[in-house]
Amino acid sequence: MVQQVQTPKETGTTLVEVKGLKVHFPVKGGLLGRTVGHVKAVDGVDMFIRKGETLGLVGESGCGKSTTGRAILQLIKPTSGSVKLDGTELTKASANEIRRKRAEMQMVFQDPFSSLDPRYTIGQIISEPLQNFGRGNAKEVQEQVSHLMETVGLNPYYVNRFAHEFSGGQRQRIGIARALALHPSFVVADEPVSALDVSIQAQVLNLLQDLQSKFGLTYLFVAHNLSVVKHISDRVAVMYLGRVVELADSEKLYETPLHPYTQALLSAIPVPDPEVELRRRRIILEGDVPSPVNPPSGCNFHPRCWKAQAVCREVIPALEEKQPNHYAACHFPG
Amino acid sequence: MDTTNRNQDLTTPGVMVPGNSTHPDPSQIGSTPPTPGSDNVSAGTTQKSLTPFQESMKRLRRDKRAMVSAFLLLFFVLIAIVGPPIYMHIGGTVTTPEGIKMSPAIYHSPFRNNLDYEDLAPNGMFWLGTDAVGHDLLARLMQSLLISLIAAVLVEIIDISFGITVGVLAGFYGGWIDQILARFTDIMFAFPSFLFLMLLAAIFGPWADTHLNNIPILGQNGNARLLLISLAVALTSWPAMARYVRGQTLQIKESQYIEAARTSGTNDFKILTRHIVPNLFSIVIVASTLNISNTIINEAGISMLGLGVKAPGSSLGLMISDSLGSIETPHSWEVLLPCIVLAIIVLAFSFLGDGLRDAFDPRSKD
Amino acid sequence: MAANLLEVKNLQTHFISRGGVVKAVDNVSFTMKPGETLGVVGESGSGKSVTALSVMRLIASPPGKIVGGEINFEGENILDKSLDELTELRGSKISMIFQDPMTSLNPVFTVGYQIAETVKRHRKDVNSDQAWRRAVEMLDLVRIPDAKRRAKSYPHEFSGGMRQRVMIAIALACNPQLLIADEPTTALDVTIQAQVLELMKGLSSEFGTAVMMITHDLGVVAGTCQNVNVMYAGHIVESAPVKQIFEKPAHPYTLGLLQSIPRMDQERGSKLTPIAGQPPDMMHPPKGCPYAARCPKVQSRCLEELPPLISVGRGEQVAACFYPN
C-alpha cells in the first residue's frame, strides 16, 4: 500500500464547514419532569475540514468532542448552527435527504464490541449499507463485500463468521469495512483505537492512513489521546467544555500552543522516554472541569487559567486567526 | 484507554477476552487462507459457524437440571396430545354388572364416569385407577394436561405479540405510548391478578358458558370458559412482558450497532425488525418460559374454585377439587396425583427458565 | 544494599474453567526494595493485574488459584498466612488502589469515615477522635481543598480524580510499606492523570513507600518508575531500570511496543511499526516463547524452548529471549 503520509492540504477546498454548532440536552427534574436546565454539550463550535485532510478533534471526557462528531453527521440533531457537507446544508435537510446523504458521510465507532450486531455474520454486517442503497444484486453485493474485506486486511474466507469470533482489532477492521462500503468522502472516526491494546492500535492507525491515501478520504478523528491525534492529523482542533479553543496545523499546535488550556493539556501527556520526562515541566491544572450545565461566564476556562484577567470572566473570546492558519479563542494567547 | 478489557484482565484473563480464544489469527486473515487441518477451517465459506443462539443452546445442553426439566415437559406435552387417541384403543370390551358392553373408547374417555368402578387402585384396566365417581384418572390427567397446554399456548401467543409490540414501541420511541404502558402496568401490578381473574370469570363466565360451548376442543365438554380464562391470564401477564422488552429495547437502542445501522442509512422499520427484535429473542424466551408456570397455576386455581373448566371437562385444578375429599381416605392417591403433576410442571418450567437465562446470559449467574 | 521488601519467586496463578486452565501468571519472579517504584507494563491478559492481586491474596477462588511459588513480604511468605493475618496485613502494610475508584469506595459512608475506619482497624491504640483527625489530615495531604468539610461528604459528591485521591488517602493512611496501584489513572483524563501521578510521586518519596505501578501506558512508567517489568502472556519478558528499558530494550516485544506507539514529542510523518498478529490464546499457549508467533527475530529454537530470564550483559537488565537486541 501507499507509504506516503498525506501532507497538509494548505490550499485544499473545504469539504465540511461547521458554524456556531450547538447541541443542548434538556435536564429534566422535579415531580412533573419539567426541563430545569440544559447540558450544553456543544456550545458554539466553529471549524472547517479540507478535502483529503485529517482533522483531529481532541479534548477530555465530557468536552463534547464525540457529540460534535455525531451532530455533524446528524446522528444527534443540533440545537442550532450550521453544518455544510460539500456545500449542502445538513441541519435543514429532511430525514429522507439525510438518509440519502449517508452514503457520503460515514462513521467508525469506538467500541469494537457493541458496534457490531451479534446476530449477524461479517458479510451481513458489511452488506447492510450496500443493500440499503441498492448497490447491486445479491452476487454483486457479495463481491463488493469480499473486496472490502480484503481492503481492510481481512480474509474474505471468514465472511460467514460472526463478529464475536474475532479480536478487538479485527472487529474494528470490520467496522471500517462497513463504513467504506458506500465509498464515502467524509468519515468521522470516534476514538477508533482507544478500546484496543497498545500493540494493536498501530495496526488500525496504519490501516486508516492507507485507506485515506487510497480513497482520498477526509477524516474527522475524534480522540482523547493527543499522541495518537498528533500522529494521524494534518490539523488539530482542541475542545474544552463544548467549544473549540484552538485549531492549527498539527506540528504548529504541538510546538507553539497558543491557548493556556492546550499548553496544560500538552504538558500533562506522559512521554515514553524517561530522559524527556525528567526534563519536562508540567503545568498542573487546579481543580476539575466545570459542569456543562452551568458553564463559567466568559471564557469557560478562566477559573482554572493562570493568565485569567477580568475580561476573561466577562467576554467569550472568539476563535480568531492569531497567526496564519493558527486559530485560538483566548484573550491573552501565547 | 482500554476500559473494556481492563475488568476482564482483573477477573479471568484470557478466558473472557473474546479476542483470545478460538479466533482466527489476523496474520492468517488477509494473507494466506488457513490450511486444512488447522482449527480455523472448522467453518468454511459455505458453512456458518455457531450463531450466538446455537452457542446458548450448547450451554443449555450442559445444564443437567434444565435438560431433565425440558425432557419431562416434552413428555407431558406428548402424552397430552398423542396419549388419549392411543389410550382409547387399549383394552378389550368389558361387560358391566348391569350387563352393558363397554369398549375402551368409552371407559377410557375422560368425560365419562363409570359408577361401577369407583375408587379403584391402579390396575390393568385403569392404569392410574379411578376416583370416587369412577373417572379414569389417567384419561382425566391426560385431558387436564391438554387443557394446561392449550391455556399456556394461547396465553403466550397473546403475551408475546402484545408484549413485544408495545414494549418495543415504548422503548424505542418513548413518549405517550411509554407513558400509557407505564400507567397500565402500574395498575396491573397494584391489583392482585388472581382476584382480577376471579372477577372476570365471574362476570363473563355465564356468557361464555352459553356462547362458547360449541367450539370443538376449546369449548365443548365443559371447556366453554377456556378461551375466557386464557384471555384473562394474558391480560394480566402481558404488561410484565412489555416491561421486560421495553427495558431491553432501551439497552439495545443505546448500542453502537444501532447507531451504525442508522449511519448506514437503515430506516427505523428495518432497525426495529432487523436489529432490535432479533436481539430481544433471548429475554422473550426466558420470560415466557417463566410465565408459563404462572399461567398453568392460574388456570388450575380458577378451575379449582369452579370458575373455569367444568364437568365433564377436566383440568388439574378441577381434578384436585373433585378429589379433595379423598385426602383423609385410603384413596388419597386421587388428589395427590394431580397435585404432584402440577408441582412437577411448575418446577420444571422454573428450572428450564433459569437454565435458559443462564444459557442466554452467562454473566447473570454471578 | 537494603534487604528486599518484596520477593516473588516462581509465582504461578492459574484460572480453572470448563474450557481448560489459563496460566495467567506463569513462573513469575521479581523483587522490590523498600521505597522502590516498580512499573509493571503489559497489555490486557498479560497477567500484570493478576500478579498484583496475587500479592494481595485477592484472587477470586474459584476460578483463580495460586498453584505455586512464594511471595515473601518482609521475609514472611504471604501464601502461608491465615485469613486473619492477611486482613491485618492488607491496608496497613500493603495497600492497593484500583482503576475505578467508585467501586472501591462504599457509597453509604462519608469518605472521612472510611479513612478513619481503616486507621482504627489497624491501629488499636487510636480512638475515634484521633482517627477522624488522621482522616482529615490525609485528605489535606492528598490536596483535597477544604478537607475538614469535605471529609463529611459522600463518594458521589466527588469527581473521578478526587475519588482517586480519596483512595490514595485511604491506602496511605496507615503508612504502608508497599502501595500497589492497578491502572490508577486509566479512567482519568490526562490533566487529572498528571495531578494524581504528581501526587503519588510526591507522597511515596515523602513516606518512603514502595510503589508497584501497574499500567499499560509506557508514558506513565517513564515518568514515575525506577524499574520496570514488562509482562507478556503471563511471563515477565524483560526487567530493567527504566532508563535502559527505553534506551536499549532487550526483548523484541519491548522494542515492538515502543515502536508501535505514537509519541507526542516526535515529528509526525513517519509510519508506526505495529506488532503483527495478536497475543496467544491463553487457553492453549504455544510451546516455546509466547511471543514467537509475532516476533520478527524468531528462530526455530524459539518455537521449541521457553527462554529463561537471563542477563543481557548490561547491569541489572534481564530479558527472556534467546536473541536479545
Image: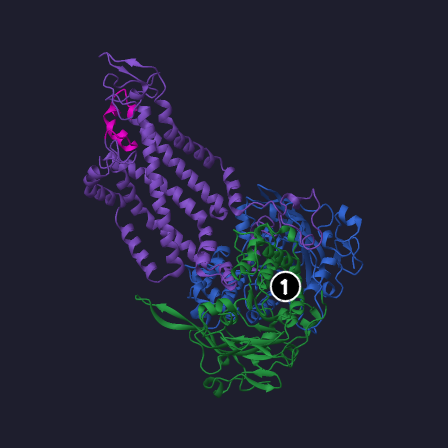
Can you say whether B221 is above or below C155 in the image?
above
For the record, the magenta segment spans B311-334
- Say if residue C93 shows up in the picture: no
Can you say whether B144 is above or below C5 in the image?
above
Mark 1: few, some, or many residues within 10 Å (few <14, many ≥20)? many
State the residue in front, C48 or C86: C48
Q: Residue at x 39, y 44 (%)?
A: B288
Q: Residue furthest front?
A: A137
Q: Position of residue A296 (x, y in %)?
A: 45, 79
Q: Chain of mark 1?
A: C
Q: Is residue B338 shown left or right of residue B17?
A: left
Question: Disc 1 marks which amino acid?
Answer: Asp
Q: Position of residue C125 (x, y in %)?
A: 48, 57
Q: Position of residue A274 (x, y in %)?
A: 69, 69
Q: Which chain is green?
A: A
Q: Which chain is blue?
A: C
